[in-house]
Image (tube, rainbow, N blue to C red):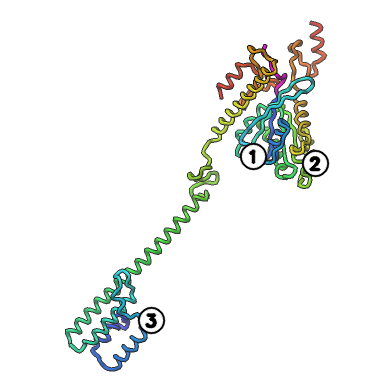
Amino acid sequence: EVDCVYTICEIMCLEPALNCCNEDVTVFLYLRDSYRSVMEFGEESSPAVAFGKDAFELTVEDVYDISYVIGRDLLKISSAGEEVSDLQFKIVRVLEMLETLVNKYNLSLEELKMERDNLKRELDRVIKESSAGQGTQTAGPNQMVVDLTDPNRPRFTMQELKEVLQERNQLKAQLMVAQEELQLYKSGILPQAEPAMVEVDMETPAATDHNPAIINDPKDEKTTIGRL
Amino acid sequence: MAKKTYDLLFKLLLIGDSGVGKTCVLFRFSDDAFNTTFISTIGIDFKIKTVELQGKKIKLQIWDTAGQERFHTITTSYYRGAMGIMLVYDITNAKSFENISKWLRNIDEHANEDVERMLLGNKCDMEDKRVVPKAKGEQIAREHGIRFFETSAKANINIEKAFLTLAEDILRKTPVKEPNSENVDISSGGGVTGWKSKCCS
């Protein structure tokens, strides 16, 4: 039991338990008391404050304060004999257990906080990476990550764009034909019954023949439109 | 027989890097106007302009392509139908000049073999910002056996001349069917034969 290393808790409680009421010990305790109140707690707070604390807010230092106060009080009744001495050892044991529990609790709390902070940082990093469109982990060199919340994200295929453009150009050509026709009617060149033939050849890319002078007939135009 | 407002239809195509002024060149030619705000062409667009050459009304259907690489698959599918292609670069943009060979390769790959080509060095009004000497443009055009003009859509320099020249070049090799001499090709050196066959039949 007698170990060379004592916890502060043990020292504080065992001192009075030594049954010594000689002056040295009294002076020692007094000096330490004064030192503590000045250096650690300031002038107004005292070790007894620890008793008023919430159990979950206790630090190991608070436990030492509690030990100190209990030790000091035990010293006052230490003359009472063996029963008190037994009680002192039990109290020391309980205080040791309290010290261990508080220590462990605070350590676990610290560990959990660190883990939480690490996870937060990791989450931030992952979010930043994915929103920046970097996505080096998920996308290959020829792939890109699309932010689904971006209203300007690409969402049509090249084929769809191609078809829309073809339709736009087809309509534009028809508009031109209509405008030209209207102009002809207005200027009186065309009689009412005769249709104007001013088709624009809108045949796209797939056109196989390369007849430089293309004059469409209505059938061709219709099939072109139908295909589009 | 239906009446038509033109004798021939020529399909032209404008290609070149993004921002060299293809749309502006076309806009100057078709509407005789110029707009300084840059609006990138989406995919492909076209304009129509009817001109008169050698007594013939020629309708020019001019396709304006997007220079951006991402529209490549759309724009290249329009090469095939073109009879004339204008390759435009920007004399204030060295990169656009360096890319000429890339565009020429595109023509080789996607256009008809006998397509008429022309090189334009646009923005020639911006002499203070010029980085491509006119001689370099002339040289590369000579190497590839194609015509070359320096143009300015903004200052209206050589725009109409370029289009008309291209149209003339196409017209020159276009077989024309004369209403009164069917099957006689007067454009390919067969004139005498044509005349003979006509008078001797």
Q: Quadrant of residue A193?
A: top right
Q: Position of residue B67 (x, y in %)?
A: 65, 38
Instruction: Report how far apart the C-alphas of labels 1 and 2 lie in the structure.
Output: 27 Å
Q: Position of residue B186 (x, y in %)?
A: 78, 16
Q: Which residue is mark 2?
A: B134
Q: Position of residue A146 (x, y in %)?
A: 50, 44
Q: Which residue is mark 1?
A: B39
Q: Quadrant of the C terminus of chain A?
A: top right
Q: Which residue is mark 3?
A: A42
Q: Is residue A7 visible?
A: no
Check if residue B121 falls in the magenta segment: no
**Element at badge 1?**
loop
Stretch in magenta = B1-9
At label 1, which amino acid type do we have? Ile
Q: Quadrant of the N terminus of chain A?
A: bottom left
From what the image shows, is residue A82 above or below residue A135? below
Specify whether disc 3 shares its chain with disc 2. Answer: no
**Element at badge 3?**
loop
User: Taken as a whole, is the magenta stretch helix, strand or loop?
Assistant: loop
Q: Is residue A8 left or right of residue A182?
A: left
Residue at mark 1: chain: B
At label 3, which amino acid type do we have? Gly
Instruction: Report how far apart the C-alphas of labels 3 and 2 lie in the structure.
Output: 88 Å
